Image: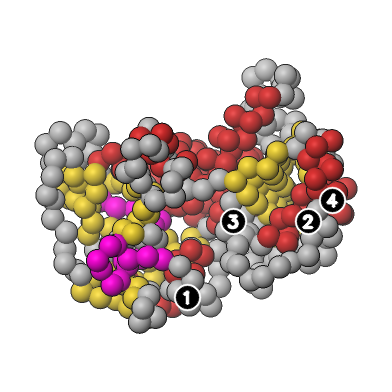
């Protein structure tokens, strides 16, 4: 079958012929891959910044944002049958007996760091015609969500980040929202970045009632102001509005959702985080040496204003289920906005074009099968 293989030692990647997987154990599901999203992680892997093949193999099959169709199931599989749509999770447990998180199926909180990830670290990914996966790692997707369901995985980043936000904010002995209103009503949120992770995060925040601002550069030819307005957010252009001006414009910022991976931007925006606020970090910056940031005011505010910094990575099965629920609601409320996040689709044979980083737009998708 066709697959996209990355050869780190040889520093090359290409469409390859890989053996088609077969079901070999109870609880397994065979899937025909429909679409696979291209993200910054994939571009970094094909730039050989990281990415590890499975043990004993010399290439890694790329891809971790995926939508698939079930083609075969084993006895005992519940909730999935041939013809159903499904989204697979990404991270797999470390297998270390002492790791309480992985032993409770929360490998997104793994203590050992020996987890594996489909298409990233130690396990082949989803940019292939077929995969076989255990049913515990799959979430069923409504057929009506088919046009945009490949966005589920990037939305899980916001889902997990906001779940942690609400868990942390139970520390506050009061609620701003009036009874019957979404729990974020009366709170202000700033999203850093106008890419797919940022825009999906902004939709999540709007859905939960936050007064939401997106602070981002404006790529040439984009309409981020129109996109933001279409689902109830406000766009603030980073080209013309400074970070202090952003703070004055928004007022007390209750939560910042970072989706850029630019550390200097993130830590400078921390200076305008409000009282009792939380700063959610989702980006993973490349290590390019030291960057000057005045940290004294950041530390002062974190102490004197009861601020919290939350790092969040990958997501567990329940977070995927929550993302499917929320994406369904996004698509019901803002169908054109959600659909417009996907700006280009490429057949698997043309995979090098979207991985080059030169394709304009918000989100590129690899179409593996129709």
List x then y, in percent, for residue 48. 45, 74
Residue 64 percent location from the top left of the image: 39, 57
| Residue range (magenta) | 51-70
Sooner in the amino-acid sequence: mark 3 or mark 1? 1
Q: Which mark is residue 268?
A: 2
Cα gap from disc 3 to disc 1, whole angstroms: 18 Å
Query: Which quadrant of the rendered structure holds the N terminus?
Result: bottom left
Q: Secondary structure at mark 3?
A: loop
Task: Give the residue drawn at x 11%, y 49%.
Answer: 24
> Residue 335, position in %: x, y?
51, 48
Horizontal side of 215 relative to 230 (left or right) equals right
Local secondary structure at mark 1 = loop
Is the residue 294 above or below the residue 105 in the image? below
Mark 4: give few (<14), some (14-19) or many (20+) Cα within 10 Å: few
Name the mark nearer the viewer: 4 or 1. Answer: 4
Q: Which residue is mark 1?
A: 47
Question: Tags 2 and 1 in contact by the CB under 8 Å rule?
Answer: no
Residue 43 part of the magenta-drawn span? no
SS label for mark 4:
helix
**Label 2 or label 3, whichever comes before in sequence order:** 2
Distance Cα–Cα, label 4 vs label 1: 36 Å
Question: Which residue bears the numbered disc 3?
Answer: 283
For label 4, the residue is: 296
Q: Residue at x 47, y 75 (%)?
A: 47
**Residue 337: in sight, yes or no?**
no
Secondary structure state at the residue bearing disc 2: helix
Instruction: Return the disc, 3 or 4, that comes first in the chain's sequence.
Output: 3
Residue density around tag 1, few if under 14, some if 14–19, many if 20 or more, within 10 Å? some
Q: Mark 4 or mark 1: which comes first in sequence? A: 1
């Amino acid at each position: 079958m066709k697959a996209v293989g990355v050869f780190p030692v040889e520093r090359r990647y290409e469409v390859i012929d890989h053996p088609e997987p077969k079901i070999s154990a109870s609880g397994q599901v065979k899937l025909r891959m429909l679409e696979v999203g291209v993200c910054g992680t994939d571009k970094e892997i094909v730039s050989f910044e990281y990415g590890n093949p499975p043990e004993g193999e010399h290439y890694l099959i790329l891809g971790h944002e995926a939508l698939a169709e079930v083609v075969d199931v084993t006895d005992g599989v519940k909730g999935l049958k041939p013809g159903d749509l499904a989204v697979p999770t990404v991270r797999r447990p470390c297998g270390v007996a002492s790791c309480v998180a992985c032993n409770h199926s929360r490998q997104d909180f793994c203590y050992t760091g020996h987890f594996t990830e489909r298409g990233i670290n130690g396990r082949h990914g989803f940019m292939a015609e077929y995969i076989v996966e255990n049913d515990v790692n799959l979430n069923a997707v409504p057929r009506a969500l088919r046009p945009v369901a490949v966005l589920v995985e990037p939305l899980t980043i916001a889902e997990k980040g906001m779940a942690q936000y609400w868990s942390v904010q139970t520390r506050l002995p009061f609620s701003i929202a009036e009874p019957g209103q979404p729990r974020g009503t009366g709170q202000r949120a700033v999203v850093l970045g106008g890419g797919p992770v940022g825009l999906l995060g902004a939709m999540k925040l709007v859905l939960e009632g936050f007064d939401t601002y997106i602070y981002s550069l404006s790529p040439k030819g984009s309409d981020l102001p129109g996109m933001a307005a279409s689902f109830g957010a406000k766009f603030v252009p980073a080209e013309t509005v400074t970070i202090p001006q952003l703070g004055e414009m928004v007022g007390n910022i209750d939560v910042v959702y970072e989706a850029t991976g630019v550390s200097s931007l993130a830590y400078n925006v921390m200076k305008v985080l409000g009282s009792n606020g939380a700063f959610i970090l989702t980006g993973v910056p490349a290590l390019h040496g030291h960057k000057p940031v005045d940290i004294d005011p950041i530390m002062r505010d974190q102490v004197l204003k009861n601020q919290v910094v939350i790092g969040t990575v990958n997501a567990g099965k329940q977070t995927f289920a929550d993302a499917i629920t929320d994406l369904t609601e996004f698509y019901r409320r803002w169908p054109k906005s959600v659909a417009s996040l996907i700006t280009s689709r490429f057949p698997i044979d043309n995979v090098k074009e979207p991985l080059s980083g030169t394709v304009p737009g918000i989100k590129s998708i690899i179409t593996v099968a129709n």
